[in-house]
Amino acid sequence: MNKKLVAVAVAGVLAAPLAAEAQTANVTLYGRLNMTMEAVSGRAVDPNMPVNNQLQNRTVYRVSTNSSRLGVRGSESLGGGLSAIFQIESNVSADTGGGLLGTRETFAGLQGPWGTFKIGNFLAPYDDIHPIFGNVPTLTTSILSTAALWAQGSQSKANGGFDARLGNSIRYDMPSMKGFRGAFQLSTLDASAGQGGVVYGDQATQQRHAYIMSMGGYYSNGPFNAGVAYESNQKVRGPALDDWAFSAAANWNFGFMKLGGVYERLDYDTPTGSLTRNFWDVSATVPIGPGELFASFGDAGNGSGTAANGTKVGQLVKGDETSARQWSVSYTYALSKRTLTYVGFVQTRNADNAAYNFNINPFAVAAGANASGFVAGLTHFF
């Protein structure tokens, strides 16, 4: 009995400093459930039809989760204005159940008057362009996402996308100075494994220096916001393939309406030459009644450059009639500070040789077909 009492006393003494240290940390559990009911349609392959007649106009009714998440984050004051910060954010598949631990914004870092440094897995500065022009009222996600054409947002890094989380990353964000701020991120990759599970093969054994560099500069002053960003993917899609993207965006809030716009240039290396594309988008957010109306129109031009006709990276194809346009309209109504609802319609209109569709929860269509979707959503933050 005495031995047990001594053990309890020793454990209490050892635990006391840990408890005291824990009290100096600020830890928050947070999350978001964003669910939609959708009706999506387009000319696509119907697996229930005979093989020689599978290309049909299809309408699919489905429930989707849209960037739902569960996370824990915190900070600890280290003195002298310096803090240690951390975050572990996980995907939640609220439509089918399940999820993946730590697959979203997950990092450890330091924060002080000089800015913020973090290391881990997170979005790059290039992604910071999207909220400047995109569908913020519907949280820049769902099939309403304005990144369906911009940045080839539906594509992985291995397929030429420029709107993705980057593992093996370090990032520095400078503090805001008179409305200006900047950010730089570097993601180092092993070319033998690639990004997203891609394996380049034995030919890459001497070329294992794949990396991604992303940087951006942003300005915010009252009703005006603007940003420019550049991202370079070196040997990510293959040992000798270097790609880059550039975006410039701005918005102005006039009170009765906020107008936004973006211009983007994509440039890919291919075995037959360069493959390029220009994109632009304009958007408007208008307070109407108790909610917000959002409308957007974007245009992705034909694939051009020196590559051979038919060369493809992601959904971008070289040649005539490879352009696409996307328009969307939505209305968002907040039921409370933590719960909102929305409805919307989106359509991606493809030229004869293009097959773009949606960003989040895509619906693949045949070349030349339009991808359309109606959505009704409910979101709760906690």
Image: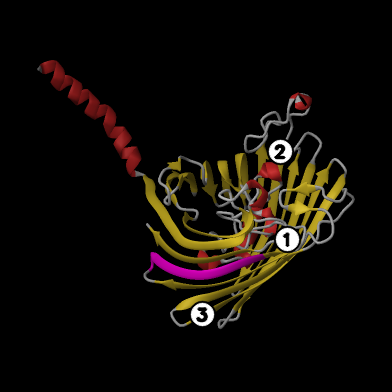
Q: Is 37 or 155 nearer to us in this picture?
A: 37
Q: Is residue 218 above or below residue 208?
A: below
Q: Residue at x 49, y 62 (%)?
A: 38
Q: Which residues are magenta?
A: 337-348
Q: Which mark is residue 211?
A: 2
Query: CA–CA distance between discs 2 and 3?
Result: 43 Å
Q: Which residue is identified by label 3?
A: 287
Q: Is 235 or 377 nearer to us in this picture?
A: 377
Q: Secondary structure at mark 2?
A: strand
Q: Residue at x 19, y 25 (%)?
A: 9
Could you tell whether 310 is left or right of 64 in the image? right
| Residue 72 position within the rendered picture, expressed as x and y whole percent measured from the top left | 41, 46
Query: CA–CA distance between discs 1 and 3?
Result: 35 Å
Could you tell whether 378 is left or right of 52 in the image? left
Q: Nearer the viewer, mark 2 or mark 3?
A: 3
Amino acid type, callout 1: Gly
* Residue 118 visible, this orientation: no
Q: Is 80 or 369 nearer to us in this picture?
A: 369
- Mark 1 neighbour density, 10 Å: few (under 14) some (14–19) many (20 or more): some
Amino acid type, callout 3: Pro
Q: Nearer the viewer, mark 1 or mark 3?
A: 1
| Residue 162 position within the rendered picture, expressed as x and y whole percent measured from the top left | 68, 50
Q: Is residue 18 above or below residue 81?
A: above
